């Protein structure tokens, strides 16, 4: 196990900078997921930690030892790729045992290590099979087993289950989590799938365009997004974001969306911190914090439904408010169709405000 530290890491491919000023500490035994859209630099960061890619500048430390000039083989790190890179002429047992041959273990020790890993990954019954006789999920279990068997300092995984079908991915997700709990190895995992990230990570590192956007526990990046990019990237369906104008009088603030005349009522205490910013303000509100009613109620604004997505357990309903749209999460069948009049309100306690030009979250004391 190990702590991994990146200090001011930069990576250029020719003139293109794909990692910008990366500072990141991954704690001993931690499961960190790097999440971001395709091309944002996740894989390059992972490969740089493993030593499969050199960095243009900056430093990488493993347990306090500088490794950025060391070869991959000297970093004691294991890597699992998306493609199942097993040796086709060896059976599962030999595939898993292979990395142990190089370290000169006795036969008995090797046998014990392979069987222990096979047990954890539930592939004991498959040890005699060749890779060609394995299903996709089992191949990836073997690849993970081979990576883990020599007890590396850290396990790096690049979209290891991205090629599997949805049901198998779900199964493998919980297995990888179980494996991490039982082995406790420092793990860095790359994905563009936010469900995978939310369910596996102790902390998520969100990247965009080579830049680290936020590092935090899954609930932290969901509940307290640092900027508009994170707010709109994390969560499905995506957070509603609308330009707003604020008007405060007495103890109340009206938060007006778009060019609408009516606004939502907020206790002034939740918006006081926005007054001095002088910035153009965007409101972010998740669909589950938008509530619809069939009849007029205090604080609710009349609107028309424009689109409905029935999702089985719930519906996503779009409503038009002046020149803005809001998506609400409702119980199934709450509205019967488009063009229906309903009343909408939002939960001030779950509202986020952002500086429109910098994208940064504007938070009060709470
Ligand atoms: N060897 C290379 N030479 C030149 N450009 C590269 C090389 N490897 C990656 N890139 C570029 O660097 C950028 C970041 O790539 P990277 O693979 O790290 O992104 P990613 O976030 O992992 O994306 P994906 O999920 O698609 O793998 C991309 O624009 C990619 O085209």
Image: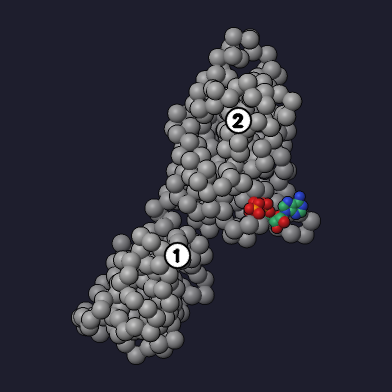
Which residue corresponds to the image point at 45% horizontal and 62% vertical from the top-left? Answer: 236
N-terminal-most mark, 1 or 2: 2
SS state under label 2: helix
Q: CA distance from mark 1 to mark 2?
A: 35 Å
From this view, report whether residue 89 is shown above or below residue 32. above
Residue 60 coordinates in the image, percent (x, y)? 63, 40
Q: Which mark is residue 142?
A: 2
Which residue corresponds to the image point at 64% horizontal and 43% vertical from the top-left? Answer: 82
Answer with left or right where residue 310 lies relative to residue 302.
Answer: right
Which residue corresponds to the image point at 67% horizontal and 26% vertical from the top-left? Answer: 130
Residue 100 coordinates in the image, percent (x, y)? 65, 19
Is mark 1 in CB contact (under 8 Å) with mark 2? no
From this view, report whether residue 20 is shown above or below residue 180. below
Mark 1 nearby-residue class (10 Å; few <14, some 14–19, many ≥20): some
SS state under label 1: loop
From this view, report whether residue 240 is shown above or below residue 257. above
Residue 68 coordinates in the image, percent (x, y)? 68, 38
Residue 88 location, quadrant: top right
Depth check: 104 or 364 in front? 104
Mark 2 nearby-residue class (10 Å; few <14, some 14–19, many ≥20): many
Residue 320 appears in the figure:
yes
Answer with left or right where residue 264 lies relative to residue 86.
Answer: left
Q: Which mark is residue 237?
A: 1
């Amino acid at each position: 196990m190990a702590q991994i530290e990146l200090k001011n890491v930069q990576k250029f491919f020719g003139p293109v900078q794909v990692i910008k000023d990366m500072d990141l500490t991954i704690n001993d035994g931690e499961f960190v997921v790097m999440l971001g859209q395709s091309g944002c630099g996740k894989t390059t960061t992972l490969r740089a930690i493993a030593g499969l890619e050199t960095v243009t500048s900056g430093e990488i430390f493993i347990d306090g030892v500088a490794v950025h000039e060391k070869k991959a083989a000297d970093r004691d790190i294991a890597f699992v790729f998306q493609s199942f890179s097993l040796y086709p002429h060896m059976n599962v047992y030999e595939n898993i045992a292979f990395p142990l041959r190089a370290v000169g273990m006795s036969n008995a020790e090797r046998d014990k290590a392979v069987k222990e890993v096979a047990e954890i990954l539930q592939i004991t019954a498959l040890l005699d099979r060749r890779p060609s006789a394995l299903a996709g999920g089992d191949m990836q279990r073997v690849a993970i087993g081979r990576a883990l068997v020599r007890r590396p300092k850290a396990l790096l995984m690049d979209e290891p289950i991205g090629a599997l079908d949805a049901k198998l991915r779900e199964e493998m997700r919980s297995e990888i989590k179980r494996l991490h709990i039982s082995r406790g190895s420092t793990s860095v995992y790359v994905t563009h799938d936010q469900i995978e990230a939310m369910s596996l990570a102790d902390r998520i590192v969100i990247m965009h365009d080579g830049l680290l956007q936020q590092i935090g526990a899954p609930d932290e990046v969901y509940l307290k997004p640092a900027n508009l990019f994170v707010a709109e990237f994390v969560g499905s369906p995506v957070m509603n974001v609308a330009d707003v104008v604020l008007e405060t009088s007495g103890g109340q603030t009206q938060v007006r969306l778009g060019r609408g005349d009516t606004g939502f009522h907020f206790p002034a205490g939740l918006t006081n911190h926005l007054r001095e910013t002088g910035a153009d303000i965007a409101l972010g509100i998740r669909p589950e914090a938008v509530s619809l009613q069939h009849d007029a109620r205090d604080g609710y604004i009349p609107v028309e439904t424009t689109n409905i997505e029935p999702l089985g357990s719930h519906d996503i309903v779009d409503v038009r408010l002046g020149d803005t749209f809001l998506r609400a999460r409702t119980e199934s069948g709450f509205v019967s169709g488009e063009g229906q009049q309903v009343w909408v309100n939002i939960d001030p306690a779950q509202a986020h405000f952002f500086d429109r030009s910098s994208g940064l979250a504007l938070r009060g004391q709470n």
